[in-house]
Structure formats: structure tokens, C-alpha cells
Image (cartoon, rainbow, N blue to C red):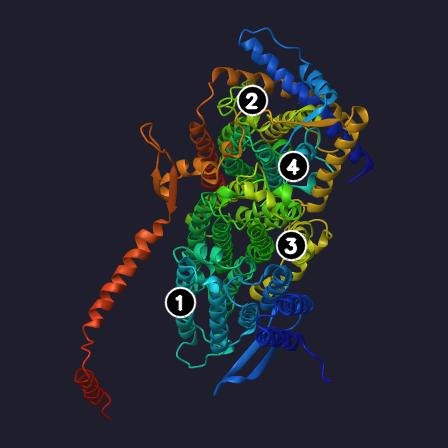
Amino acid sequence: MPDLLPIDLLLIAACAWLAIGFAGIFAPRNLRFISKILFPLGAFVAVLAGLTSLTFLGGATETAVLLIGLPDLPFHLRLDNLSAVFVLLLGFASAGISVFAAGYFRQGEGAAPGLMCLQYHVFLASMLLVLLADDAYAFMVAWEGMALSSFFLVTTQHRQAEIRRAGYLYLLIAHVGAIGILLSFGVMTAGSGDYSFAGMRAQALPPFWGSAAFLLALFGFGAKAGLLPVHVWLPEAHPAAPSPVSAMMSGVMLKTAIYGLLRVSFDLVGTSIWWWGVVAMVVGLATAVFGVLYSTVQSDMKRLLAYSSIENIGLLAVALGLTLIFHAYRMEALAALAMTALLYHCLAHAGFKSLLFLCTGSVLHATKERSLGKLGGLIHRMPWVAWLALAGVIASAGLPPLSGFVSEWLLLQAFLFSPGLPHSWLNMIVPVAAAVVALVAALAGFAMVKFYGIVFLGQMREPALKEAHDAGPWERAGLLWLAALTLALGVLPSTVIGFIDAATTQLLGTGLADQVREHGWWMLAPISAERASYQPLVFLVTIVIAGLVGRALVRRLYHGRGRRSAAWDCGYVFQGPRAQDTAEGFSQPIRRIFEPMFRMERHFPTIRDEQPYYSVKVEDHFWHWLYLPLARLTNAVSALVTRLQGGRIAIYLLYSFLTLIVLLLVARP
Amino acid sequence: MSISGLLWQLFAIVLALALAPLLTGWVNQCRAWLQNRSAPPLLLPYYMLHKLFLKDVVLAHGASPIFRFAPFAVFGCMLLACAIIPVLSTDLPFAPAADTIALVGVFGLARIFISLAAMDVGTSFGTLGGRREMLVGFLAEPALLMVIFTLAMIAQSTSVATIVETLAHREFVIYPSLAFAGIAFTFVSFAENARVPVDNPATHLELTMIHEAMILEYSGRHLALIEWAASLKLYAYSCLGLALFFPWGIAQGDSFLGLLVAIPMLVAKLAIGGVLLALIETLNAKVRIFRAPEFLGTAFLFAVLGLLVRLLLESRV
């Protein structure tokens, strides 16, 4: 038996996922078989894929050619360190999601379980192939497979018009983006007709065409990732999908777009110009601010998380921009720092956002409610979900000692080193960008406190919530896995950087691993201990010990007595659940301070109203400024085109005849 | 790291625990004098803590474990913050555990816990306080980070100890950017410590308070810990400000003599700082909550200005 290389193992994993998917078709209604056997099997394959890439990291690039594809362009596959980092992310995040899904899918919700199983595993396999593809054709096939399978997953409950609409929007923007990617690949072949990535690497593009390729890729992949202004599908599609699918899309699929951007801008284009970084950074900052502001004002828990994903994608784009700027000026050590922040944040976000989306899934199942205004107090009924969600919330707010803080810390460190850029204008812009990043991080905390406080804390806003039940064992296992990843990414940054550094080294020629290893696994000091260091474990242990010692001392020196009573609330008597802040009330300061950022329709009660009510509806400016005019334009153009359709066969024959004559005239030898 | 270093580190933590309520008491006393009131005893905060620890805890019916857990977490966070900041010496075994950015993170973590605890019982004032605290937090945090960035660029490091060493023990240079950063830091520390003009520590008027609204439901030892944590926060911010902007007197190594000088220096600086704090609080009125963004926006602008001054004027030198 020949030795199996990691790339072979990953191909086997992709085939295994496809096989698991098709196995679901044979018993489409057998929920037990599908959820208790096929989904855990898929999770097992995912863990294996993750471990394979973990062992591969740092190794030499491997390639393979499959005998399928176009006649003269078989599928080229390639596993290098960049792919391996993202396969790692895919494997470990989807393992948790699949285990959760084993307990999540129920009978009678939307599509048959067998179909879901097929779509879900095709989705996984095509994401894996996207990461392994080494020619434009294979990449686009896998990319489309990913878009289509996820489209069907989003529209699982296609009987609701609103979900069909969300799915349509998703499909539309996915395809507009795909056109951008395709054109970018076309530019990068530079007319050589060689669509393999190796051929693109060999081309030296002039700056103009290089920039065109980069901008097209930024648009195309940006549409998948949710960058402004092609973000509108994201807050519609994520809430529409079942929660494991939202988790998969937000945690993993968005990262494939980041992978594509990294692949194009550092590997395929081959040159880099400083203003690409500025473009990416400005778009990223706008996206991050937009995302976080809108996430604070949402009243639907999944939409809130979807906008928070937009914010995180914006931060990733900022990190990408910073890397590009440093790279363009050949400041590779700093570029490596920024890229480490980027890759780290990809991993961190995959962990905590999947975790949070899955928690909303459990809440949704337990309460049948997605609106924040009808939740509350669930920590009493769902302690498992609530405590695990707390880990996701702290990580998502970018606070130590969990995963979100590490990437934020690295990114801010990279910003701090920016002086020294040979461009005074850039030197001024970059710290201001850091200020915006700081604002975004602080606002993310606001959004997360709102999410957690309103869903899990306080009094129950509806009597029906008393019936809520905690997550089942499969769901708990999936959540625990992701929470453990979040914690591990938070307290073991040096170890993780030791792994992902291979990708940085591959793309930039230099990495952080040497400096990081110097200081031992418990301490993160990316440049030198003098300059900056962070020891998350010491951090965590100190807080825990201080808390515990404090508690023990108080009990020893004084006492631990306590009793229960009604809440005090300044003696105010009417303490029903309606007296708490609503989701809208909690975000009122944001709406007031950042008023121009929102398009609001508000109705205030007056004293003359028979039935006074208050309502606020926040809409996206982009709908009204960009999308609706575009839609109207498209309709108008289509109306013109319909004039060509006379409906009589003679006219159509005439068209064919005229076309033929024109062609003959043009194509004369 | 050495044994004596570790001992001094422990001593600094114990000193923080002991001095923090005293600082609060001193500020209260100064403010009373300035406002022509007869002053409460200097040691009143200690009596308060003792009294609260003796009392039974009364928990609201709807309180979840988060409510009981939060005071300890907040207390732990503040203790960690006090351990990182070089109060007496820059040679701290704990210093590499967290740099200034992580220090901002510690304060953020404490804020999240206390806001969540405020929302936990589900009363109108609790959620109101939690929301306002987060509002002040997201306005103050970027400004604080910008101040830190300015200092980090001067010292070429984000480690607190290195920044203090650079500013205190190298050749004396006047940095104009530090003036801007100092103003911004002062503004931020007023907001973060629930002081006039953003919040009023003396008020219990429900609609205007922030910090007090959040801890309304707390009693007994929980309240004591939160109050202690609040004084620790004031102490930590004061020490941070003193360490960053008036670093003279902080010992560089762990020489006994240097540390012996550092203690009276610290007490003297804190005493003067307390008088100034009381003076500013007396001279100002509390602003409406929606003027707080303007106040902190000004702080943010000052901080960014400091950063730009640093980048444009001083980096050429």
C-alpha cells in the first residue's frame, strides 16, 4: 500500500463527506439514522481533516491532478500551508457544528432530513475543494457548488416568502461576486490561456492589470464575505437558515472568501502596490463600523449576530489592508505581524461566531422565538447554553482572556508599528484607522452585552419561556467543543501561532514563530518581550485565584449567609418584565448618537392616542441609495428588451436571418 | 524574576488593597471641605466595608449565578489591574502578563461583568444602568487606547513598565503630545470612575445615576466587594496616570532604598491627586447623559491630536 499523503487524505475526506451526503438520500425520512449516524460520522471526518492539516502545517507543498474536469484542463489540486490553515479552520469548526446538528434537526421542519444531510455535506466537501483547488476551473466549480448547496440550505424552510426572498438575494449576490472572481482569474491569465494557478503565478502582470485583478477579486470575494456595499445578503440569509447552517456560513464559509483574497493578493498576482492596502483598509473600516453599529440596533438575535459577522469581516479586511501596505513597502516582519493577526482572527471568529449561532439555535428550539423582545431570563432554564454562550460573548467582544482579544491585540500591535512607512500621508492615516478599530471593538462589547443580557438575563418577557428546555446532549457536546476551541485559542496563542506561522512564512517569506517560540508557550511576545507581551494564562489564573481567595477569605473572616427576597429597584413596585429594557430601548443611545448612520422610521406615542404605541424600524441606507435604484434600472432595461419580443415566429426568424448576415459580413475570410 | 521581586509584587497588591479605600475616603473628605460640609471620617470606607461584610446578602428572586459570580470576577479584574501597573517599582514579575492594551481589556472585562450583573435581576434601573455603563465604556475605551498609543509610540513599547522607565529614567525631554494625552486621560478617568461630570458618586437620584443604578440590587459582601473594586479602580487609574505622566519616584530595580523612597512619594502624589480630583468635581456640574458623548468625544479628539502631534512633529526630532 502506498503511503497516503495529507492531500490524499483530504481528498478522501471530501469523498467521504459526499458519500455521507448521498447516504442520506437513501433514507430521506429516517431521522434517527441521519442525525445519529451520518452527522456524527461527518464530524468525525471533519476532525480527521483538521488533524491532517495540523500535521501537514509546515510541510512541503503537495499537488495532485484529478482525471475529471475539462478535456485539456483536469482538476489541479494543491495543498500548501495557506490552504492547510483554512482546512484546519474548516475541520475543527465544522466538527463542532456537525455534532450540534446531530441533535438539532427535527422531523417536519422544512426539507426532508435526507436532503438536508446531502446539501450539508456537499457544502462541506465543496468548501474543502475550494481550499484545495489549484486551477481556476476547479476553483469555480467548487465555489459554485458551495454557493448552490448553501442556497438550498438557506431556503430549507422555503414555504415562507421571506426566506425565499433571502435565498434569492443570496444567490443573486453570490453570482455577481462569482463574475468578479471569474474576471479576476481571466485578467491574471494575461491572455496565455493557462487557467491553472501555476500558470497565473508565472505571469508578471503590469501594474494596471495587476490592480484590475486585485480590485475584481476584492469585489468578488467581498461579495461572498459581506464587505460593503455587497453585504446586504448576509443579514437576510443568516437568520433565514437553520442555526447550524448559519454557524457554518458565518464561521467557515465567509473565511473561504478571505482565503481567496489572500490567495489572489499574495500568491497569484505576484506584485503588490501600496494603495491596494489602503483600499482594502478603507473598505474594511467602513464595513466594520457599519456592521457593529447595525448589530447594536437589531431586535432579532440572529440578525444581530449576522451584522456582527459583517463587522468581523471588516476587521479582517483592515488586517489584510495593513498587511498589503507593509508588504508593498517590503516591511515583511510587520506584514507578518498583521497577517498573523488576520489568520488568528479567522480562527477565532470561526470558533466564537459558530458557538453563538449554535446557541441561538438552541434558544430557537427551546422557545420558538427569534425576537429579542420576547426572550429573557433563559439562564434559569438553559444554564448550559447560557454559560457556554458567555464564552462566545466575551470572545466576540474582544476581551481577554479569550480568543477574540488575541487577534485584536496583534492587530493593534501591528498598527502601533506602522510609523516608519515611507509615506507621510499613510503614516497619518494608519493611526486614525487604529482609532476606528478601537471604537469598533468597544462597540462590539455593547452589542454583545445587549445580546447576552436580553436573551439570557433579566426576567422572562413571555410566560411561555418558563417551558423552555436546555440543549440536548449532542447540542451540548457541539457547543462545548467550540467553547473549548475559543478558550484554547485564547490562552495558548504562542502554540497556535507556531502552527499558523507556516502560512505567513509561505506568503511573506518571514514569520513570527522564531520570536514567539523564544519566550515559551505561555507568553506571547511577537517582537520582543521589551516591546509588548501578553500572558493569557497568567491573566486568567490571576483573576480566578483573586476571585476564589477573596471568596474564601470573606467566608472565613465573616460569613457566607444569604437569603432571597423581592428585588429592591429603589422600592419601585411595578417590576414586571415589561419594565426592563427592550432590545430597542437598550440600543437607544446608539441610535441617538449615530443617528445619520441609520434610516429610521419611528412612531412616537402622543397623549391623545387612544392606543399609544412606540415603534422603530431601522433600515439600511444601502437599500435605498444603491440597491433599489439598481433594481429599477434593471427593470427599465429589461422593459426595453421586451420590445424585441414580438411574439410572432416570423419576427424571430427575421432576427436569426439578420444575425446570420451580420456574422457572414464580419467573419469574412 | 527574583524572590524579592515577587515579594515586592505581593506587597504592591496588598498596598493597593489597603490604600484604595483610603484614597476614596480622602477624596470624599476633600470634596466635603470644598463644599463647606463637615467631612466624613477618613476611614469611613473601611467601616463601610466592614459593615457590609457583616451583613447578610439579600438576593433578588430572579438573580442567577452570574449575579453572584460577578462581584468576585470584577474584584479579581481590578486586583490584576493593580498588579500590572508599576506603583512602586518598574521591576514587576507580573508586568509581562499584560501590557497596556491588555490592561484596557481587563477594565473592559470588568465592565462587561458588572453590566451583565446589572441586567440580571431584570429591573428597570438595572438595565438602565447597564446600558449607560456600556455607553460610557464604548466612548471612553477608544480614547484611552489612543492615549496609550501615543505613549507607546514614544516608548516604542506597549508594556507599562517600559513606558514608565522610558519616561522616568532616560534623559528629560518635553513631549508636547503628552500634554494632549494627559488631558484626554484625565477626561477618560473621570468617566470611567463614575465621577462628575459624567456620573455622580454621591447621588442616588435614580434617573441620573450610572454606577449606582447598576449595583442597586447588591447587598452584603457582594456590595462590599463591588465597592472595594470601585475604589481599586480609582486607585488603579490614579496610579496609572501618575505612572504615565508623573513617573518620578518610581524605583527602577528592586533596591530596598529606592522602594523605600517610592512609598512616601506615592502617598504624596495620591494625596495631591485626590485634592485635584475633588476640586474638579466641585467646580463642575454633572452633565446630562447625552452630553457625555460630547465630553468623551472631546477626550477622543485630544487623544488623536496627541497622536498626530507625536507623529508629525516629534518623530522628526
The quadrant in which residue A652 appears is: bottom left
Q: How many other residues sit within 10 Å of disc 2, few (<14), some (14-19) or many (≥20)?
A: some
Closer to the chain start, of discs 3 and 2, is 3
> Given the image, on which type of amino acid does mark 4 rest?
Ser
Q: Which residue is mark 1?
A: A207
Coordinates of residue A484 in the picture (x, y in percent): 68, 53
The x, y position of residue B276, in whole percent, is 55, 18
The amino acid type, in three-letter code, at marker 3 is Leu
CA–CA distance between discs 2 and 1? 68 Å
Reading the image, the residue beneath label 4 is: B64
Kindly report the distance in space between the C-alpha atoms of the residues bearing marks 2 and 4: 20 Å
If you read the primary sequence from the N terminus, does the residue marked by circle 3 or circle 1 appear first? 1
**Of A466 and A61, the residue lying toward us:** A466
Give the answer, above or below, for where A394 lies relative to B230.
below
Above or below for B98 versus A352: above
Chain letter for mark 1: A
Give the residue number, with chain letter if any, for mark 3: A479
Q: Residues within 10 Å of mark 1 (few under 14, many from 20)?
A: few
Q: Nearer the viewer, mark 3 or mark 2?
A: 2
Q: Which mark sits nearer the N-terminus, 2 or 1?
A: 1
